[in-house]
Structures are given as C-alpha cells and as structure tokens.
Amino acid sequence: MTRLRRALRRTPAPPWLIAAYLSVRWRCRVSPSARVRYPLAVTLGRGARVGRATIIASGNGVELGTAVEIGDGALFDAQGGRITVGPRSAIGPFVVVYGEGTVSIGADVSIATHSTVVALNHIFDDRDSPIRRQGASARGIRIEDDVWVSANCVLVDGITLQHGSVVAAGAVVTKSVAPYTVISGIPAKFLRDRGPHDTAPHRQSTFR
Ligand SMILES: CC(C)(COP(=O)(O)OP(=O)(O)OC[C@H]1O[C@@H](n2cnc3c(N)ncnc32)[C@H](O)[C@@H]1OP(=O)(O)O)[C@@H](O)C(=O)NCCC(=O)NCCS
C-alpha cells in the first residue's frame, strides 16, 4: 500500500489536468495540450494564453505577465535560470527560449516564429576533451520593452536588446543593441535608426 501511494505521488498529473489547474489558479488560458513541468514554479498573469503543445519547464521559475501570449509549439526551458516575460508580450509559434542563464523579456515585446533565445555557451578551449565535458557559461539575456525580434532570429548569451530595438528576420545577434536601432544579418549589424528622433546619446552601440 505504501509503495502504491509512493508510486502515485511520483506519477505526474496528466497535462490537461495541470493546464486546467493553472488556468483556474491564474485566470488565464493554458491549452490542454500544453505540457508544464513543475507547475508550482510557474506564475502566469491574468489573461495570459499558452498555446497548443507548448512546453514550459520551470527551472528556477517561469513568470508570464498579464495578457502574455505564447504561440503553439513554443518551448520555454528555464533549466538553471529563470524566464520572465512582461505584460502584453507576444511570443510566436515554435519560439525556443532556453539555457542556464536568466532570460528577461520586457513588456510589449514581439518575438516571431522560429526564433531562438539561448542563454548558454559551451566552453571549448581544450582540444583534448570533448566539448560536452568542458562545461558551459551563461550570463543571461535581456530584452527590454517594446522590442521586435522578427522570424528566424538567434539571440546568443550575454546580450541586451535595449528598448524599441528591431531585429530583422534571420539575424544572429551576438552583441548588445542600442535603443531604437534596427539590425540585420549574420552576424547582425546596424541597418538604420528607427524613426526621426535624434538618438545621438545612444551612439555608443556596437552597431554604429
Ligand atoms: C527589417 C524589416 C522590418 C524591413 O525594415 P526596413 O527598414 O523597412 O528595410 P527595407 O525593406 O527598407 O530595407 C533596407 C535594407 O535592409 C535590407 N534588409 C531588409 N530586411 C532584411 C533582413 N531581414 N536581413 C537582411 N537585410 C535586410 C534590405 O535588403 C535593404 O538593403 P539595401 O538598402 O541594400 O537594398 C523587414 O525586412 C523584416 O525583416 N521583416 C521581418 C518580417 C517578420 O519576421 N515578420 C514576423 C511578424 S511578427
């Protein structure tokens, strides 16, 4: 009997039940086909929506603000870090956010489909040992408010996208980006300023 009880405690609840619990608990909509591991480490804002077949694995916690939308098939795997998303942000279908570092996404951010935000780099200095055994570094990634990351972009560890910046489709972003700057390409480079305002104070950006 004790063994049965222990086995039952270890058996995870079915995804639809966890989704129903989270939807009621946080007054939001989690698709019954989404899979949320460690649901007690997840905080969801009122009116948030988590799409079909999305996977959320909480690590040190996943926090979605009010009215955040997570598209179908997205993966949020906080591993050793934490993932936070500010209010009204929209994360497109099949976006992947993971790594050992903390990823903080601000308010009113859009991240389009198939983009990857990866807060982790493997260490590979030693030729004589497999890269997989050399460990990893993770500084974290910060995306400030009102940023648009277009489709198929890759954001690597350690960067900050400052507020109002835009990343053109297909870019690989390896350096931090100044406010209201549009960048594109691999590696991403300055494309233009956004809008007519004088952005001279921000001209320290790596992309200028
Ligand atoms: C960046 C973008 C927004 C256009 O910005 P824009 O400033 O209006 O750019 P323009 O179309 O005037 O092009 C300016 C230059 O940038 C280049 N460019 C535009 N988009 C580019 C991209 N994704 N990668 C590389 N270069 C790009 C253009 O070829 C052009 O180069 P040229 O001056 O040598 O001819 C658009 O190209 C883009 O990438 N859209 C993303 C679409 C998407 O992912 N939507 C998802 C919806 S959530």
Image (cartoon, rainbow, N blue to C red):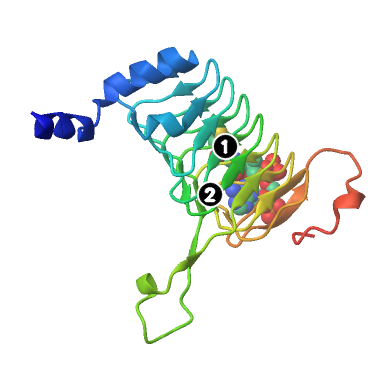
Quarter that holds the C terminus: bottom right
Q: Quadrant of ligand 1?
A: top right
Nearer the observer, 186 or 139:
139
Nearer the observer, 144 or 44:
44
Q: Residue 166's spot in the image, x, y percent? A: 68, 43
Q: Secondary structure at mark 1?
A: strand
Mark 1 vs 2: CB contact within 8 A: no
Nearer the observer, 88 or 136:
136
Q: Which mark is residue 112?
A: none
Amino acid identity at mark 2: Cys
Q: Secondary structure at mark 2?
A: loop
| Residue 83 against residue 174 in the figure, above or below | above
Label 2: few (<14), some or many (≥20) within 10 Å? many
**Residue labelled with disc 2:** 153
Q: Which mark is residue 84?
A: 1
Left or right for 32, reference 91: left
| Residue 110 against residue 129 in the figure, above or below | above
Q: Residue 161's spot in the image, x, y percent? A: 68, 48
Foreground mark, 1 or 2, reads 1
Label 1: few (<14), some or many (≥20) within 10 Å? many
How far is disc 1 from disc 2 in space, using C-alphas? 19 Å
Q: Please identify the quarter of the rendering in which residue 96 is found.
A: top left
**Farthest residue, direction left:** 1
Q: Please identify the quarter of the rendering in which residue 37 is found.
A: top left
Q: Residue 134's spot in the image, x, y percent? A: 42, 74
Quarter that holds the N terminus: top left
Q: Residue at x 49, y 38 (%)?
A: 61
Dot 1 or dot 2, earlier in sequence: 1
